[in-house]
Image (tube, rainbow, N blue to C red):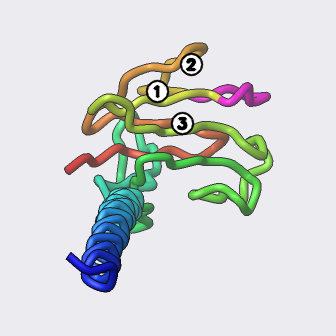
Amino acid sequence: MTVEIILFVLRLVSGAILLGIMGVLFLALWRDYQSAIVQTQAQRRIYGRLVEVTENDENYADTEVYYPLLPLTSIGRAPTNTIPLNDDFASGEHALVALRNGQWWLEDRQSRNGTLINGLPIHDPIVITDGDIIGVGHRRFRVELE
């Protein structure tokens, strides 16, 4: 074998190795991109809604105001919340509704006037279900899950 043939074979082998490395890198980036798409879609997915209700003689009537229930739904007076409230009895960051391990949790965020679930104050995070009534300030919301 001549030197030229050996160099030609080495160029082919090094080119194939380089293409293989680039292919593996492209595959890793593609999988990461697909994972980011799935995660973004999951965050945008609506899992139900919170329906604002009014209390009439221990019954609740819909006000036709609906808020989407996202995996992290914050409720409070601050405009950065998922559900901003115009209520002087609500704190800036009053409550949080979160999806954790397949269950919905309601958590009071150390608000001044507290958060209610079905008329009872909560102090620790609590699991909520379809039909529960969440009280924040003077407002009431019925949980409707998909």
Residue linked to disc 1: 117
Q: Can residue 91 be seen in this view?
A: yes
Label 1: which secondary element: strand
Can you say whether 29 is above or below 96 in the image?
A: below
Kind of residue indicated by mark 1: Ile
Measured as percent of width and height from the top left, residue 66 is found at: 41, 64
Do tag 3 and tag 1 residues touch (Cβ < 8 Å)?
yes
Can you say whether 95 is above or below 18 in the image?
A: above
Kind of residue indicated by mark 3: Gly
Q: Which residue is drawn at 44% across and 66% down?
A: 65
Can you say whether 37 is above or below 106 in the image?
A: below
Of 5 and 58, the residue lying toward us: 5
First-in-chain label (3 vs 1): 1
Q: What secondary structure is the magenta-colored segment mainly?
A: loop
Label 2: which secondary element: strand
Q: Which residue is drawn at 76% across and 41% down?
A: 91
Measured as percent of width and height from the top left, residue 32 is found at: 38, 60
Q: Distance between the residues labelled 2 and 3?
A: 9 Å
Measured as percent of width and height from the top left, residue 1 is found at: 20, 76
**Horizontally, is 117 left or right of 142 in the view?**
right
| Region rendered in magenta | 109-115
Do tag 1 and tag 2 residues touch (Cβ < 8 Å)?
no
Q: How far apart are marks 1 and 2 (CA)?
A: 6 Å
Residue linked to disc 2: 121
